[in-house]
Image (tube, rainbow, N blue to C red):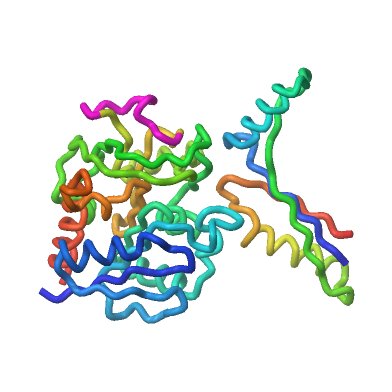
Amino acid sequence: MKAKIYVTLKPSVLDPQGKAIHHSVELLGFEQIQDIRQGKYFEIALDSQMSETEAQETAEKIARNVLANPVIEDYRVEIV
Amino acid sequence: MNMKFGVVVFPGSNCDHDAYHVISKHVGQPVDFIWHKQTDLSSYDAIIIPGGFSYGDYLRAGALAQFSPVMQSVKEFAAQGKYVFGICNGFQILCEAGLLPGALIRNENLHFVCKHINIKVENPNTPFTTELSVNEVLSIPIAHAEGNYVCDDATYNSLEENNQIVFRYCDASGEVTSEANPNGSRANIAGICNFGGNVIGMMPHPERACEELLGSNDGRDIFRSLTNAIAKSE
């Protein structure tokens, strides 16, 4: 079982790296790009004996306490 | 007057020796390096969390250092009203650990900025600033890529109301302008303290501004303030 965790900056927080990437993409000639935001993606391998609920709870705890800083970031967890 | 300072050393700290040098040579007080696995801080009056790249800045600057064993002790130390001083990466660590509000993100201009800048004293009544006067301008170097202070409106308003904004970036005449803001920090914030005033974090490096030979000794008054605060509380 695997947890996929996506960490993204809150919409209200400026993303200077995303802006720089957006600029480079425009330099390449892509014109209809409105915005680019950079985030982080984590894959966590979980014990296959875990129930889906346990897996979800564990992954959420890890995301909340370690992977994301709730002051500036949001996270989303998928169990697959 | 007996007082003792501790400088925490994480894997990747690199301003620990600068802080140690300033305390031993200019403050003239006993100081120890404290490896991040140590948990007994009972013999110290003040803890400095120095600059550097703890844990290689992996995940976020300061994010992994908050889980080092010493940090639980630093939280208890701070809760007792003792003095905790975070400089640069130390400021980032204190925010990540929840000892100071807000967060420090990538500089708006994306550059690693390494130069002398000016900061203005907003609050001369903290234990770290009593030797300074309000609106005094200090020349202190910065060296960081993640010094862009962010917080939500409610946090900002409470910082303002409680006089927790200690330093702001300014120009040489003390004007707080966007041109004088090196990293995009909200309202030019360069340093803040907690509600009790015993925990402070700042991005500029006062420990690198204690000798005229290095371009400025404006940082000395910050350490002198702290020493006086410890002497008074004993």
**Residue drawn at point x = 50 percent, y = 57 percent:** B62
The front one of B223 and A12 is B223
- The answer to whether residue B162 is visible is no
* Residues shaded magenta: B172-183
In the image, residue B178 lies in the stretch drawn in magenta: yes
**Residue drawn at point x = 42 percent, y = 74 percent:** B73
Question: In the displayed structure, does residue A58 sit left or right of residue A52?
Answer: left
Q: Quadrant of the C terminus of chain B?
A: bottom left
The front one of B42 and B116 is B116
Question: In the displayed structure, does residue A7 sit left or right of residue B19?
Answer: right
The front one of B186 and B87 is B87
Question: In the displayed structure, does residue A79 sit left or right of residue B91?
Answer: right
Residue B110 place in picture, x, y as percent: 53, 36
Q: Quadrant of the N terminus of chain B?
A: bottom left
Residue B59 place in picture, x, y as percent: 61, 56
Q: Is A8 above or below relative to B32?
A: above
Question: In the displayed structure, does residue B116 sit left or right of residue B113?
Answer: left
Q: Is A32 above or below relative to B67?
A: above
Looking at the image, which residue sits at the far front?
B213
- The answer to whether residue B152 is visible is yes
In the image, residue A3 lies in the stretch drawn in magenta: no
Considering the whole magenta stretch, tell me its main secondary structure: loop
Q: Is B148 above or below relative to A3?
A: above
Residue B215 place in picture, x, y as percent: 21, 44
The front one of A52 and A73 is A73
Q: Residue B9's image quarter?
A: bottom left
